[in-house]
Image (cartoon, grey):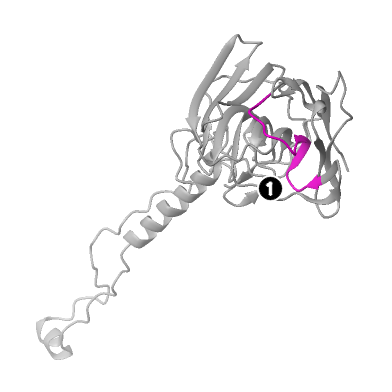
Amino acid sequence: MSDEHPEPGFADGEVRNDSGDPGFADGEARNDSGGLGFADGEVRNDSGDLGFDARMAAGPSPPPPSRAPLWPVIVGLLLVTGVGLGMVLNLSRSAAVTLFGGSGDEESSLNWAGYVAVHGHFTSVSASWVVPAVRAGSTPGSAASFWVGLDGRGTRSLQQIGTTSGLTRGGRYYSAWWEILPGPSVDVPLRIAPGDLMSASVTSDGRGGFTLSLRDRTAGESFSVRRTDRTAPLSSAEVVVEAPASATGQLPLADFGAVRFSDARVNGRPLGSFTWSRVDMTDASHLQASPTALAAGGSAFAVVRQRH
């Protein structure tokens, strides 16, 4: 998922969650510092009554100490709150410019785990999965996104749609979204719950038009949007799990256990019938998530969250 689901001159569709923690949001910014009141405006002289002559002899009283205006502080607080809220509201998926290492059909990425169809011209991708619950012990502020998309492997172009499971200090949250880079991540108005069976697809008409669709088969609800990206090279197709990012960078990957993608198809055929790369998500020291071998004729696999 580029940066930056998510979160970029965002339109109406920021990804939201249930917390006020930095990296996530419930859409509410709070200030717990109390009121920033002004003083009562009264200058008091506690030196006692000097009498008229004594006051004249002493000369004019010095002006009261000047008080720094509070408006710069207030504006600063508003700016900080706004930035924090943007970080929270706007999870962003990102193009896999972080792919590194490996050769042939084995690659590693800092933020993706799954399968990518390569070396072809791709006009559609689709898959189904069950929304995984975030497991106890996950790091607050962590998240995992599950999606299908076209482009993104080695390019800044990416058209994608999917769901996110995450955790904040306020609890777990589940959401749906779509995104066409370099634009913002936009909320999908579906009420997502763990255990829901989702089906997603991205389809190009070959002339720059894209239809992104998501269906919650458990709830019986669906969503579809059509957008244009005339610069899309259509050079890859993805079915992946991602550690999304906020304005501060990549978030920790939530512990989702494992997610199984089924009926994974590219151009209407099983993903495995194309040249593909198997992508592990890894950081400098640990394997974070990895896909299993393709099954069901090349149309199914699982991504497993590794524990350390």
116 is within the stretch colored magenta:
yes
Q: Residue at x 69, y 24 (%)?
A: 267
Residue 33 in view in this figure = no
Q: Position of residue 202 (x, y in %)?
A: 61, 26
Residue 98 sits above or below residue 161 on the image: below
Q: Position of residue 56 (x, y in %)?
A: 11, 87
- Magenta residue span: 108-125
Identity, as a three-letter code, of the amino acid under mark 1: Gly
Residue 97 vertical position relative to residue 204 in the rendered view, above or below: below
- Reading the image, the residue beneath label 1 is 154
Q: Position of residue 102 (x, y in %)?
A: 86, 49
Is 295 placed left or right of 116 in the picture? Answer: right
Q: Secondary structure at mark 1?
A: loop
Left or right of 63 in this view: 248: right
* Relative height, residue 87 to residue 209 (above, below): below
**In terms of image quadrants, where is residue 70?**
bottom left
